[in-house]
């Protein structure tokens, strides 16, 4: 299994697989002649953690964020809904968050904006399932950052761009895609896709579902986890992935009260 994130129409240097200590030459900032040119006409996929960070930054609800800034695709290659950032409809089709001074929510920009000009791919060994990842450069004609002399290791770039937490949360999503690609999902009906979408992308609705339905009577959720779910949106998202593994993929990630040892979903 291999996965990667790259902008469309970009030259991808897959011949040179980069590991954490390999180097590449790049710099970006107001000094480059192409500053903010890349923040337009994008097909920019937003992960659940991206949406979480953005709606918090904008101090709006998930529903308001999705209504105002997102396009939801229900039919996708992997069969699970996905969310794209809505570019401005007119003119240069700019990102709604770009300004002449750069990204207006830089500290909370999406993972795809952070990792560029790198791409990340991972493979799972078909026999033992062991996980390997590598990086590669993504070169777009308009991007002049490669002309700069600053040298980075991949590790330095990931740290500088604050990608560790994004990768950690986004890998939990990717694991669901992998399970789906391996045919491990229950037959997915409309209600399952709605469930996936709510848990991944609508923080308030998922929290309401947990605390204002029989959910906690049915599932034996650890006390400290329940406390975290009330106040911590990131903990809630991690729990959403855990719940989806149970509900859509029959994995024993949650205990049903009074049914120790029972097959998930049975
Ligand atoms: S979110 Fe920020 S960095 Fe990403 S495309 Fe928009 S303005 Fe550019
Ligand atoms: S095109 Fe490349 S160098 Fe220019 S602003 Fe975007 S990422 Fe930076």
Image: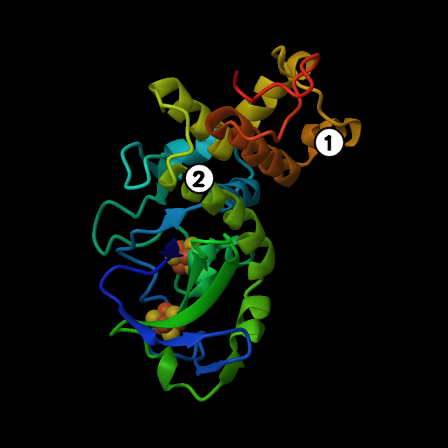
Q: Mark 2 = which residue?
A: 179
Q: Earlier in the sequence, mark 2 or mark 1?
A: 2
Label 2, secondary structure: give it. Answer: helix
Mark 1: is the Cβ under 8 angstroms from ligand 1? Answer: no
Task: Kindly identify the residue that appears in the image at 25 percent across and 59 percent down.
Answer: 8
Label 1, secondary structure: give it. Answer: helix
Q: Tell me the crowding category of disc 2: few under 14, some 14 to 19, or many 20 or more residues within 10 angstroms, Cα based.
A: some
For residue 98, say whether it is visible: no
The total number of labels drawn is: 2
Q: Residue 197 at x, y = what percent?
A: 43, 29
Q: Residue 113 at x, y = what percent?
A: 43, 60
Task: Kindly identify the residue that appears in the image at 31 percent across and 67 percent down.
Answer: 37
For residue 258, say whether it is visible: yes
Q: Residue 232 at x, y = what percent?
A: 68, 36
Q: Residue furthest bottom?
A: 149
Q: Is residue 78 left or right of residue 105?
A: left
Q: Tell me the crowding category of disc 1: few under 14, some 14 to 19, or many 20 or more residues within 10 angstroms, Cα based.
A: few
Q: Mark 1 = which residue?
A: 225
Relative to 64, does residue 116 appear above or below in the rendering?
A: below
Relative to 239, does residue 149 appear above or below in the rendering?
A: below
Q: Nearer the viewer, residue 135 or 227?
A: 135
Q: Is residue 210 left or right of residue 27?
A: right
Mark 2: is the Cβ under 8 angstroms from ligand 1? Answer: no
Q: Is residue 226 left or right of residue 239?
A: right
Give the label on residue 19, or none.
Answer: none
Cα separation, mark 2 vs mark 1, equals: 24 Å
Disc 2 and disc 1 in contact, CB within 8 angstroms = no
Q: Nearer the viewer, residue 122 or 99?
A: 122
Q: Residue furthest right?
A: 223
């Amino acid at each position: 299994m291999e996965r990667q994130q790259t902008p469309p129409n970009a030259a991808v240097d897959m011949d040179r697989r980069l590991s954490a200590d390999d180097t590449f030459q790049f710099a970006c900032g107001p000094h480059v002649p192409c500053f903010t040119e890349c923040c337009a006409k994008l097909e920019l996929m937003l992960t659940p953690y991206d949406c979480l960070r953005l709606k918090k930054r904008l101090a709006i609800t998930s529903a308001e964020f999705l209504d105002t800034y997102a396009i939801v695709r229900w039919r996708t290659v992997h069969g699970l809904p996905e969310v794209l950032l809505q570019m401005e409809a007119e003119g240069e089709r700019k990102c709604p968050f770009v300004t002449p001074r750069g990204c207006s929510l830089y500290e909370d920009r999406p993972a795809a904006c952070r990792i560029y000009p790198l791409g990340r791919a991972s493979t799972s060994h078909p026999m033992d399932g062991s996980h390997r990842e590598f990086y590669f450069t993504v070169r777009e004609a308009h991007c002049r950052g490669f002309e700069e002399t600053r040298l980075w290791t991949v590790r330095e770039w990931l740290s500088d761009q604050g990608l560790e937490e994004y990768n950690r949360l986004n890998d939990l999503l990717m694991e669901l895609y992998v399970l789906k690609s391996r045919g491990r999902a229950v037959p997915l009906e409309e209600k399952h896709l709605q469930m996936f979408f709510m848990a991944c992308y609508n923080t308030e609705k998922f929290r309401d579902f947990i605390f204002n339905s029989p959910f906690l009577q049915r599932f034996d959720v650890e006390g400290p986890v329940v406390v975290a779910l009330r106040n911590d949106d990131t903990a809630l998202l991690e729990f959403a992935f855990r719940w989806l593994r149970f509900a859509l993929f029959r994995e024993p990630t949650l205990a049903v009260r009074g049914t120790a040892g029972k097959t998930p979903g049975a």
